[in-house]
Image: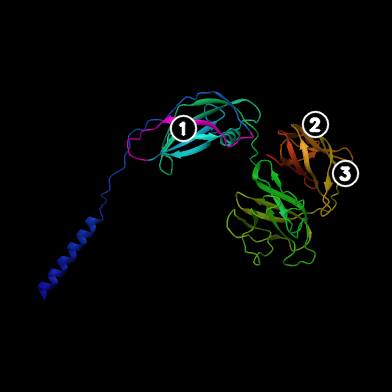
Amino acid sequence: MKNIKRFSALSIIGLILIFFQSCEDTSETFTISTPTSPVLEALSFNKIELDAVNTNNPAVTLNWKKSDYGVQAAINYAVEISKDDVFTAPVVASNVTGRNTVTLSVSELNAAAGNAGLNPFEWANIYIRIVASLGTQGNEQVISNVNTLEVYPYFNYVFNDYFLVGNGVAPGWNNNSNNPALFRDASDSNQFSYTGYFKNDNSDYNEGRFKVLETIGLWQPQWGVSDNEGSDDFKTEGTIAGNPGTQSNDPGRFGVENSGFYTFTINFATQKYTMTPYNASGKTSPASLTLKGTSTADVAMTALTFDGHIWYAKSVKLVPGEVEFVTDTGAKWGSTTSFSGVATDAGGAIPVIVEDDYDVWFNDLTGDYILIPLNL
């Protein structure tokens, strides 16, 4: 028996030694040599006018000599575009892996130029380079030489617009009934607000409800609360959800428990909303409001009968120039930011930078305005 016990103990010790030996790291260290930079080939032309009609046509093909990292690995390449030659604020126009050529369409090049800060309908230089890297984290970056290309961009409308629908707001549950627009923050394109009247006269659980649509006449994309319908209790703040923004099923409903004026805010980056009572007592609307300026002939605006403080003008032809909101007493409400902002009395003329037909909305409680192009 003693010999058997001794044999078993030795066996156990041997097994433990084998286990520890098997756990030793025998992998090889992954090393690379000093990488060589990609070399961007010169273009056969130096000037291009971007066509706003044939946006899917190829605009430019870029070719470059591949980087060499000294290992067999798929190399990532990012096409960067900037409005200055030191690439102060570059934008990425395209990403490819393992290839040394890419073709940018007219719309892709126009979007990159606009995002880099070039003005539409003006000739200006863009600067192009290739940035090589390894791995999903973009490690070991090396940068190519720079090419210059003079471009004439068309206008690139980069904003999203949003509209109210529901039995707590003017159009009811009709997705194509002059649905009021949310007002976009001029300094944060993800931040929207709407100050106005919301209706729930009986404090009914299913009244005073609304959602947010992205396109007039379409139920998706739509935004609401993250709670399911039926569990979407009235709240003053919370998390938003969207179909298809965050999920495949429709979100719950925003809402107010009592009729009154409220400020609704929603941020599509943080995915948060608030619903705050607004004191509209003593706030009077002008007897009339007219859109005036060098961009248009005088256009009489109409107040929503549901609210009285929200004004609109539909399908207004605007040309490059400026506009103001002028009251019957001669007060001129304006600002200096195009497309959206907060107007004040004698606050300046609102710039119109591109010709199109616009839906124009103005809130006389807050001075919020938004000009929504219909064809861009």
Which one is in front, 162 or 276? 162
Residue at figure coordinates x 23%, y 57% from the top left = 20
- Residue 44 as seen in the image, left or right of residue 302: left
Instruction: State the image coordinates of residue 310 (x, y, percent, origin top left).
Output: 80, 49
Q: Residue at x 66, y 47 (%)?
A: 191
Looking at the rendered structure, the kind of residue marked 3 is Ser
Q: Is residue 348 visible?
A: no
Label 3: which residue? 288
Say the numbered circle drawn on residue 294: 2
What stretch of residues is rendered in magenta?
A: 52-73
Give the Cα distance between marks 3 and 2. Answer: 20 Å
User: Where is mark 1, residue-wise?
Assistant: 130
Numbered badge on residue 219: none
Which secondary structure, mark 2?
loop
Q: Residues within 10 Å of mark 1 (few under 14, many from 20)?
A: many
Q: Earlier in the sequence, mark 3 or mark 2?
A: 3
Mark 3 vs mark 2, foreground winner is: 2
1 and 3 marks in contact (CB < 8 Å): no
Are the residues tagged 1 and 2 within 8 Å (C-beta)?
no
Between the residue at mark 1 and the residue at mark 2, the CA separation in whole angstroms equals 44 Å
| Of residues 178 and 229, the one drawn nearer to the viewer in this rendering | 178
Residue 39: x percent and y percent? 42, 28
